[in-house]
């Protein structure tokens, strides 16, 4: 296929990895996108320990991959899952990114960004309202590319208040902000989309539409 652009896929935290996104990655590739997907330190095939890493470290890793592997001469999209929203929005707000796709996005307090995963990070996010000062929302508001928010209708992980805040920001974007709610989807969207090809195709088509 003729290459029409690039898409960087950013997996979430916990037990997630690039492998969970393998099927949707192949779908994008079939439509002519250069797909870049990798495991953060402590996940999947990359190895190393998750303990001692931080959100800031994830941003540095994702930014380096973005710089080195996307085709900067064609449209570029970033698609993130859960925790991946933090580096995705940071990169989109500071680099040339045509489209941003946030799937079941998390949000974190500014204080937690440099905290090491493990007890230190858990303590930083103990307050259920700590995310409210997250600069992610301000950076997302300032991002002037097209944004697609993909929400899991049966998400038991991300608080509804966080979803509502993202919806509020997207709604202010007018025609540059779109929302897709997958009514029966669970938080692990990479896994759920793999098992639900009709819904996965809706997501793929929605992303491709942003790059046309």
Image (tube, rainbow, N blue to C red):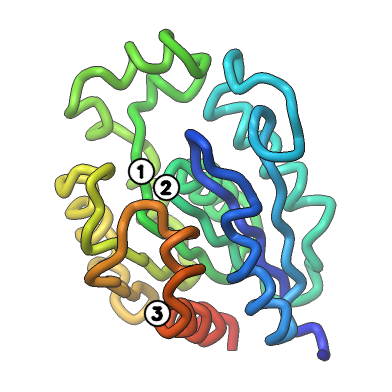
Q: Label 2 crowding class (10 Å Cα cut-off): few <14, some 14-19, many 20+?
A: many
Q: Nearer the viewer, residue 52 or 95?
A: 52
Q: Which residue is labeled 2 in the image?
A: 82
Q: Nearer the viewer, mark 3 or mark 2?
A: 3
Q: Nearer the viewer, mark 3 or mark 1?
A: 3
Q: Position of residue 179 (x, y in %)?
A: 30, 72
Q: Nearer the viewer, residue 18 or 66?
A: 18
Which numbered disc flags the more N-terminal residue, 3 or 2? 2
Q: Position of residue 210 (x, y in %)?
A: 51, 81
Which numbered disc flags the more N-terminal residue, 3 or 1? 1
User: Between marks 3 and 1, how big is the CA–CA gap?
Assistant: 21 Å
Which residue is painted at 66% across and 19% down in the image? 49
Q: Label 3 crowding class (10 Å Cα cut-off): few <14, some 14-19, many 20+?
A: some
Secondary structure category for the residue under label 1: loop
Q: Is residue 130 above or below residue 201?
A: above
Q: Any mark on residue 106, and which? A: 1
Q: Which residue is labeled 3 in the image?
A: 199
Q: Is residue 113 above or below residue 97?
A: above
Secondary structure category for the residue under label 2: helix
Check contact, mark 1 vs mark 2: CB within 8 A. yes
Task: Using the rendered view, name the quadrant where residue 198 is placed.
Answer: bottom left
């Amino acid at each position: 296929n003729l290459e029409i652009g690039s898409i960087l896929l950013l997996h979430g935290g916990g037990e997630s990895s690039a492998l969970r996104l393998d099927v949707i990655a192949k779908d994008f590739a079939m439509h002519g996108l250069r797909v870049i997907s990798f495991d953060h330190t402590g996940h999947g095939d990359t190895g190393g320990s998750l303990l001692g890493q931080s959100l800031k470290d994830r941003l540095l890793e994702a930014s380096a991959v973005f710089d080195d592997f996307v085709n900067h001469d064609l449209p570029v999209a970033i698609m993130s899952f859960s925790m991946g929203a933090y580096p995705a929005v940071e990169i989109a707000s500071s680099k040339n990114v045509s489209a941003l796709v946030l799937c079941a996005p998390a949000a974190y307090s500014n204080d937690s960004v440099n905290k090491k995963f493990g007890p230190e990070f858990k303590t930083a996010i103990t307050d259920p309202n700590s995310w409210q000062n997250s600069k992610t929302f301000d950076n997302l508001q300032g991002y002037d590319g097209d944004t697609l928010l993909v929400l899991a209708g049966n998400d038991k992980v991300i608080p509804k208040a966080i979803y509502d805040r993202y919806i509020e920001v997207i709604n202010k974007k007018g025609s540059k902000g779109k929302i897709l709610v997958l009514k029966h989807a669970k938080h692990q969207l990479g896994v759920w989309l793999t098992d639900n090809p009709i819904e996965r195709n809706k997501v793929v088509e929605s992303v491709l539409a942003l790059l046309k």
